[in-house]
Image (cartoon, rainbow, N blue to C red):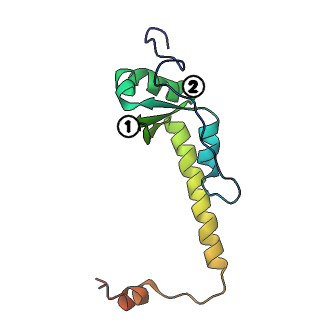
Amino acid sequence: MAGTGLTSNSPGWSTSLPSATWGDDPYALWHILYRLGMSELPISEAREHLGEVVSRAEYAHEHTVLTRHGRPVAVVISIDDFRELQAADDEVDLAAARQALANPEPRIPHREVLAELGIGVD
């Protein structure tokens, strides 16, 4: 963004990519998004340039991993990207629920499981 002086070449701003495992990974979408345009930025620098970090997320759909002492701790993404991730996560959950419901094994009611564990049900 003009005027802020923060670019992807600024100190602390990194576009390093982690190795990812593919296959039946239910979080493959997260891995893909990380590989397709996530940057890393220490929280101390993000604090100084928060407006630009948010604008990059909002308008360029850039994902910024915030780090503390070199360790990833949070991600800034646009609300649209967040909603897409939530929808993808919901689809994974629905697929798992459908698979569980299709299983012919007998089901045990929740109350019975709680009683067996000695957990009171109100």
Displayed quadrant of residue 5: top left
Instruction: Kindly report the distance in space between the C-alpha atoms of the residues bearing marks 2 and 1.
Output: 24 Å
Percent across and percent down for residue 112 are: 42, 90
Proximity of marks 2 and 1: CB atoms separated by less than 8 Å: no
Q: Residue furthest right?
A: 23
Q: Which of 44/100 is in front?
A: 44
x and y percentages locating residue 86 in the rendered image: 53, 50
Please state if 29 lies on the left or on the right of 58 as rendered.
Answer: right
Say above or below: 69 vs 3. below
Q: Residue furthest top?
A: 3
Number of marks present in the image shown: 2
* Marked residue nearer the N-terminal end (2 or 1): 2
Mark number, residue 68: 1
| Residue type, mark 1 in image | Arg
Q: Measured along the vertical axis of the image, is residue 108 above or below residue 37? A: below
65 to the left or right of 94? left
Under mark 2, the amino acid is Ala
Estimate how packed mark 2 is, as few (under 14), some (14 to 19) or many (20 or more) residues with alpha carbons within 10 Å.
few
Q: Nearer the viewer, residue 102 or 48?
A: 48
Q: Residue at x 54, y 18 (%)?
A: 9
Residue 4 in which image quadrant: top left
Label 1: which secondary element: strand
Q: Which residue is mark 2?
A: 60
Circle 2: element type: helix
Question: Would you place residue 67 above or below residue 112 in this image?
Answer: above
Residue 83, percent across and down? Answer: 53, 44
Residue 56: horizontal and vertical position, in percent?
51, 25
- Tell me which residue sits at (55%, 30%) in the image: 62
Residue at 49% in and 37% down: 79
Q: Residue 30 — which label?
A: none
Say left or right for 59 vs 3: right
> Which of label 2 and label 1 is nearer to you?
1
